[in-house]
Amino acid sequence: MKIACAAYSLDQFSDFAAYQAKLTHWVTQAADQGAELLVFPEYGAMELASLGGAAVAADLEAALHDVMRHASAVQDLHCALAQRFEVHILGASGPAMADGIARPVNRAVLYGPGGVIGHQDKLIMTRFEREDWDIAPGAGVNVFDTALGKLGVLICYDSEFPLLARAMVEQGAEILLVPSTTETIAGYTRVKVGAMARALEGQCVAAHAPLVGMADWCAGVEENHGAAAIYGPPDAGWPEDGVLAMAALDAPGWVTAEVDRARIAQTRADGVVLGVRHWPEQYARIGQRATR
């Protein structure tokens, strides 16, 4: 299959039709390149706060709630595009209300040609989400069994915690989708290294889609840096540096790469190293050291 990861920049809109036109343009571009799985970044949905006006977009709490009021229309648009182009789309994440949780979570929804497949809420909150945004953590890791393979989603900071990805791999995940928002190069590097490490450990593919560019009109996502990329394990049959494709830093647009699920299975079964198979050995070694 071909995966497309977006380095996505935020825009201001006068009405929802303008957002619809933008998203349709992006999806059309990726589909025209033959992409079957499209990945949008973390907090890309925050541009919808512009529909509430400048004062709303500049106020973090107001912006979060204003974005959520468009949830139904956003879902309908993504479903229509996924069906029209016969693609799978991980929509840009944004605030959402979860059952039993008083504060918004950070949710990414996966769509397929048949409609909504499911969603993954971010599990580990960064300091700005805890201290400034008051975003609540989600609960549980999900692996989506799709026509394109088994997919897991690690939203930004989640990619830096190996046990989350390991839980997905143990459920059969072959491709990890990593949408991100980072305001510094250091933050982008942390997610990049995390995504590459998860591809190494899980002997799988990690698809990284970052938010890029300046949006000083939108509270919380004023400055964004990153490079869209698709990573695999540096093993036989893969690039030696593990990089299947990478765009230039802060360059808006799509980056694409062909991914062969059979190659993932082959690497896990008979790679130069066998990280997935040997992972449980860590526990015994830690136990032995701990009792000495």
Image: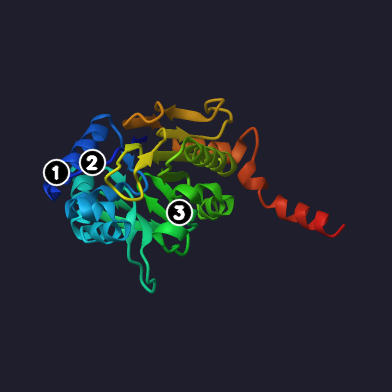
- Outermost residue to the bottom: 100
| Residue type marked 1 | Ala
Quick check: 202 left or right of 23?
right
Residue 289 appears anywhere in the view: yes
**Residue receiving disc 3:** 128
Dividing the picture into quarters, in which one does residue 11 lie? top left
Q: Which x, y percent locates residue 253?
A: 30, 31
The residue tagged with tag 2: helix, strand or loop? loop
Task: Find disc 2 in the rendering and name its residue.
Answer: 11
**Earlier sequence position, callout 3 versus callout 2:** 2
Q: Nearer the viewer, residue 105 or 3?
A: 105
Between discs 2 and 1, the one toward the N terminus: 2
Q: Residue 18 got which mark? A: 1
At 42% from the left edge and 64% from the top edge, which residue is drawn?
136
Position of the N terminus, as image quadrant, is top left
Query: Where is residue 232 shown, x and y percent of the image?
Result: 51, 34
Identity, as a three-letter code, of the amino acid under mark 2: Asp
Is 84 situated above or below 287?
above
Q: Secondary structure at mark 3?
A: helix
Color theme of the render: rainbow
Mark positioned earlier in the residue sequence (3 or 1): 1
Classed neighbour count for the residue bearing mark 3: other residues with Cα under 10 Å, few (<14), some (14–19), many (≥20): few
